[in-house]
Image: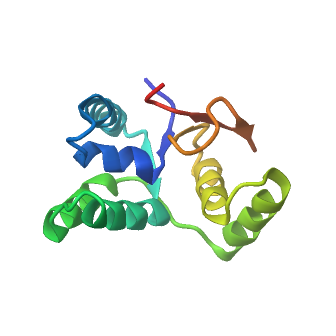
Amino acid sequence: MSARTFFDSNVLVYTDDASAPAKQKRALELFGELDREGNAVVSLQVLQEYFVAATRKLGVDAQAARRKVELFALNVAVPSLDDVVAAIDLHRLHGLSFWDAMIVRSAGESGCRVLLSEDLQHGRVINGVRIENPFR
């Protein structure tokens, strides 16, 4: 069984990106496997970012993207004010964008030790969360 794993929105967007078939296949396999195990975790922020990117960048129909949001939303981290403040500290201490800091904070607070992201530095560990680029 795999460990709880947090998905960044960029990985989820690839599940709809037919222009990158290898990444699409990998993203679908990863989410499917971890979802079956109950170990796929996302946050409200990730779901929002997925919807915007899928509909605006890839032209996914809003109803289809809405359904995917529902499918991705089995284990959802819901940030609190404490998480926002902690993300500000991560932003200041580690040079992350605020939004990336929120992702890292949400991953850690939801019990994930792995964060799948194409946008953050592969192999970096921040507050006990190891960043992995699943497409390397």
Would you identify the image quadrant in which residue 27 lies? top left
Q: Which residue is painted at 64% across and 48% down in the image?
A: 108
Position of the N terminus by quadrant: top left
Left or right of 91 on screen, residue 34: left
Residue at the limit of the structure toward the right, as seen here: 93
Where residue 122 sits: x, y (%)?
61, 32
Total numbered labels placed on residues in the image: 0
Could you say which quadrant of the image residue 47 lies in? bottom left
Q: Position of residue 132 (x, y in %)?
A: 56, 32
Whole-percent x, y for residue 96 in the image:
71, 55
Residue 112 location (% of width, % of height): 57, 42
Tell me: 64 left or right of 87.
left
Q: Is residue 6 above or below residue 74?
A: above
Vertical placement of residue 54 versus 13, above or below: below
Residue under the image location 46 percent in, 30 percent down: 134
Q: Is residue 93 left or right of residue 74?
A: right
Nearest the viewer among 111 and 118 is 118
Residue ID at (15%, 65%): 61
Looking at this view, name the residue that lies furthest to the bottom.
Answer: 81
Which residue lies at the image location 76% right of the left edge and 60% below the top edge?
91
Q: Which colouring convention does the figure follow?
A: rainbow
Q: Hey, which quadrant is residue 92 in on the image?
A: bottom right
